[in-house]
Image: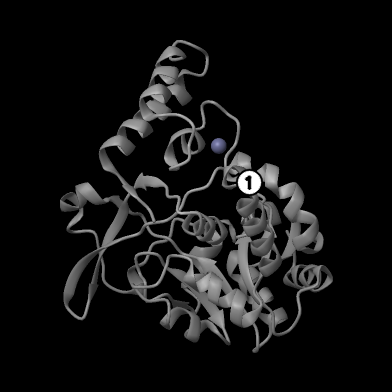
Amino acid sequence: MHTIEKIKNDLINLGIKSGDTLFLRISYRAVGKIEGGPKSFIDALLDVVGTDGTIILTAFPKKYIRQFRFLHRRQILTDKTQLKTLTGVMSEFAITHPEAKISRKLEFPFVAIGKNADYLTSNHTHDKNAYWIIEEAIIKFNCKCLRIGGEPLFGTTHLSLEKCLRDKGENQTNIRYGIYVMENGRTKWYDTPNVLFCKNAFNRNNSRIHPIATISEGTVGNGYAIITDMRKAYNEEVKIFSEDIRNATCDDPNCITCRTSYSFSDTTNFRFMLRQTARIFSSEYKQTIKAIIQTIERIFFGIKVI
Ligand SMILES: [Zn+2]
């Protein structure tokens, strides 16, 4: 069991400073048990960034396939108090913090606490892009990403990939999800279009981004911790995708995202399905069936993201 003092010292030793704006990707499991639980972690972090600092976390709720929205007419988000996030225990505790602010874009919400929280969340409205709040935090407040444990992501790939797809006139077809939101007594369905990227391709590009974007590495609690410069990570990703947009794809012949979802993907849905059907009796039959179902879903319900 870690004391709050120990966590605070770890965060300071890692290089977090008063006034920092941080996008958090934190696995509570990786940190290990803390006196007072996840709430204490958030309090410790807020203490370290001080009154001039801001923390931002994803707070995404459950979403539904657009074409089946009639089945979910009763699952209406009316305000932030109702929000149940699926993005981890840290987000769950962050949204219950007395000073937590939630995006006005309730269909794709982030939670922020601290000096710039009100500005960021109140301007993250329905008409803005999903990750607008992160982009704005990078541009205006030099936002850094604090990751502890979990997958080695920088929090910038959705932004960089979407920009490069647009610049190159390419697109991606995905299942369109969304949710009903009630505002001022009116209920409206909101889509949540978002670019999906391949983790394998990300991991390969990571070897180029990691040395450029890393500010510091260390340990917080039991977990490996890293602070990255999100502007540098974004710029390097844009460079990688601009050199060749295929750098966003992996080589796995069974990767549904890379093989079929992009306008420049190298396989048709039909060929991909044939390939999956051929390996259905192999030891990987579970992944195969999943890939087939996902392909069918996308053929019927897929919509161009950008
Ligand atoms: Zn892939």
Q: What residue is at 17 percent from the left and 49 percent from the top?
A: 71
Left or right for 70, reference 298:
left
Reply above or below: 226 against 128: above
On the rendered structure, is 208 left or right of 115?
Answer: right
Task: Residue at 75%, 62% (x, y): give it.
Answer: 213
Left or right of 236 on screen, residue 188: left
In-front residue for pair 270/11: 270
The residue drawn where x is 55% and y is 43% is: 198
Residue sitting at x 18%, y 70%: 187
x and y, in percent, of residue 125 in the image: 37, 76
Is 291 above or below relative to 34?
above
Height in image: 121 above or below 51?
A: above
Residue 182 image position (x, y, % from top left): 22, 72
Position of residue 168 measured from the top left corner of the image (x, y, whole percent): 50, 54
Image quadrant occupied by the N terminus: bottom right
The image shows residue 212 at horizontal and vertical percentages of 78, 60
Callout 1 secondary element: helix
Crowding around mark 1 (Cα neighbors within 10 Å: few <14, some 14 to 19, many 20+) is many
Q: Quadrant of ligand 1?
A: top right
When the figure is inspected, residue 129 is found, relative to residue 281, above or below; the finding is below
The residue carrying mark 1 has its beta carbon less than 8 Å from ligand 1? no
Mark 1, residue position = 202
Residue type for callout 1: Phe
